[in-house]
Every structure is written in C-alpha cells, then in structure tokens.
Image (spheres, grey):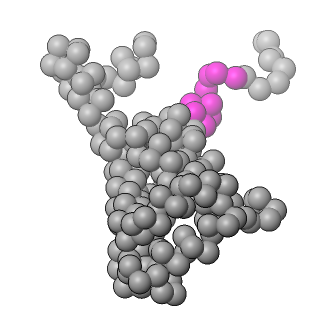
Amino acid sequence: MSHKAGPSYGSGPSYRARGDLGRYALLPLRLFLGITFVYAGLDKLTDPAFLTSGGGQGSIGALMESVRGTAALPGLVDLALKNPVGFGYAIAFGELAVGLGTLLGLFARVAAAGGALISLSLWLTVSWAATPYYYGNDLVYLMAWLPLILAGAPLLSVDAALAGRRRGRARGGVPFSRVAPAARRGR
C-alpha cells in the first residue's frame, strides 16, 4: 500500500467545500456596504437639518464650510458650496443607489465604482484632516469597495441570474440551472 505524505491539494470533498465557501467570501462585505450606504442615504434624506439651505447646525452647508480649510481638494468643497442642498441630495441619492445596487447585485461593479467615488470624494474633503490618516473612515470605505469593483457580485445577485440566463441561451436554449452540475464543472 502506498501512503502519500502531506495533504492532497485539489481533490477530495474538503477541498471542494473550502472552494465553495470561498465563493461566498464577498457576501458579508456586500451586505455591510449595501446596508450602510442605504442607511446613509436615507439618513440624509430624512434629516430635516441636513438638507437646509440656511447653513445651520447639522446642514450640508455648515459641514462643507467647516472642512473648507482642511480639505485636500478645496475646489471640490467650493463646488459643493455653490449649491449645498443640491450637493446633499446628489450624495444622498447616490448613496441610496449604490447601496441598493450592491445589495441586489444589480450592475454590481458600477455600483461599487460609484461607492468608491463617493468614498474618495468624502475622504478628500470631509475626513482628509483626520490624524493619523487611518482614523478617517472614508478611506476604509474606499478600500472596501475595491474587491467589489474587481469581482462584482458573482453569487446571489441579479447580475449572476442574468449571466446564467445568457449562458443558457448560448447553449441552445437550455437554462443554465438545468445543465447537469458535472457538465458545469467540465466533466
């Protein structure tokens, strides 16, 4: 009887199980970012002080005025100050769209790029002055969006369902869900 030394990689049920679990690795990140951005958007839209043009305490205008001197891109702050309420609505609806797209996995890479763009703009303006730099939460959000930009939402998503339908049509009308699992694995 021969005996192999060491673990066997690439075969056996435990290797496949780990590989299958790895496919779900981005789901917690998608859930966290999606829920957080939906909440942030709704929070802004329902906060009566945030979307006021008077620039009072808690308003987008007051926030932009307070970070004007410390922002990495003061021109971006100046742009927001031209119409703070419009900018506030744009950020709020952008966060809501990004969050819903991420949760549903609908245009997931586009949603992730939108989330990264929002996080980047907030990092370069609102949280730029955080010292040390890693205290600024917007930089962490920016980095968290990168895996979703690269991988999209390959599982449990509208994008994956649509891709499966397209693959089914490409196989001569047989829906992807009816293709034998062994055939999908290439056996």
| Residue nearer the viewer, 1 or 18 | 18
Residue 15: within the magenta? yes
| Residue nearer the viewer, 52 or 134 | 52
Spot the residue most to the left. Answer: 173
Please determine whether, in this image, residue 2 is positioned above or below residue 133. above
* In the image: residue 53, left or right of residue 175: right
* In the image: residue 16, left or right of residue 44: right
Residue 158: within the magenta? no
| Residue nearer the viewer, 82 or 88 | 82
The residue drawn where x is 67% and y is 55% is: 72
* In the image: residue 104, left or right of residue 3: left
Please determine whether, in this image, residue 112 is positioned above or below residue 95. above
Q: Position of residue 109 (x, y in %)?
A: 43, 39
Q: Quadrant of residue 158?
A: top left
Q: Quadrant of residue 132?
A: bottom right
Indicate the quadrant containing the N terminus: top left, top right, bottom left or bottom right. top right
Q: Position of residue 101 (x, y in %)?
A: 35, 50
Residue 93 can be seen, yes or no: yes
The residue drawn where x is 47% and y is 43% is: 113
Q: How many marks?
A: 0
Indicate the quadrant containing the C terminus: top left, top right, bottom left or bottom right. top left
Q: Position of residue 105 (x, y in %)?
A: 37, 46
Q: Which residues are magenta?
A: 9-20
Residue 37 can be seen, yes or no: no
Q: Position of residue 26 (x, y in %)?
A: 53, 45
The residue drawn where x is 38% and y is 57% is: 94
Please determine whether, in this image, residue 160 is positioned above or below residue 11. below
Q: Most prominent secondary structure in the magenta stretch?
A: helix
The residue drawn where x is 27% and y is 22% is: 167
